Image: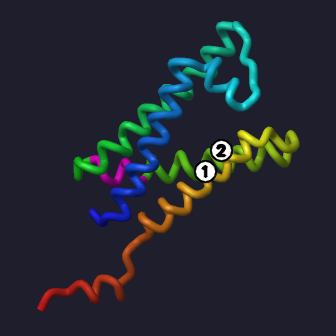
Amino acid sequence: MKLLQKIALGISGVTALGIGAFILAAPHAFYASYGIMPGSDPSLLSELRAPGSGLAVLGAIMLTGMFRKALRQTAMIAALAVFLAFPAGRVVSMVADGMPSSGIIGALVLELAIAVLCLIAFRPVTRRELSGRVAY
């Protein structure tokens, strides 16, 4: 595994695991940091915690893929799925709902930066690159 791929999985995994765990453990504090007050409705809190749990698990898979070859491909797919889907959803929301808070815009910028890193790190190897690696 290339160093850039390990770095991409590390950054993706720590980010996804950290955010997901924060949402799962303390949704009020997490969303308050964006100026959102979820209140005390158990159904709403369940709907917030559930994707937080999923995000944390995907982050753990990304981190495990750095060390376990059997999970490497899955980890790369998870990183790309998370960090391409989140910004896509935010852009759809901006078009449909209007501009969100500056905290949400900051999250979008971070997600896009991680997505670009993953796209670069996980791009397919070309034949030209492979031919340059041939040992004599």
Q: Secondary structure at mark 1?
A: helix
Left or right of residue 17: residue 40: right
Residue under the image location 75 percent in, 50 percent down: 91
Q: Which quarter of the picture shows residue 103?
A: top right
- Tell me if residue 80 comes above or below residue 61 in the rendering: below
Q: How is the image coloured?
A: rainbow
Question: Dividing the image into 4 quarters, which one contains the C terminus?
Answer: bottom left
Q: Which residue is mark 2?
A: 107
Q: Secondary structure at mark 2?
A: helix
Residue under the image location 72 percent in, 17 percent down: 38
Mark 1 Cα-neighbour bin, 10 Å: few <14, some 14–19, many ≥20 = some
Q: Which quarter of the picture shows residue 13?
A: top left
Please state the horizontal and vertical placement of residue 27, each as a whole percent of the image.
60, 20
- Tell me if residue 116 comes above or below residue 127 in the rendering: above
Cβ atoms under marks 2 and 1 closer than 8 Å: yes
Front one among 120 and 30: 30
Q: Which residue is mark 1?
A: 110
Left or right of residue 83: residue 58: left
- Tell me if residue 16 comes above or below residue 72 in the rendering: above
- Magenta stretch: includes residue 73: yes
- Tell me if residue 47 comes above or below residue 115 in the rendering: above
Question: Dividing the image into 4 quarters, which one contains the N terminus?
Answer: bottom left
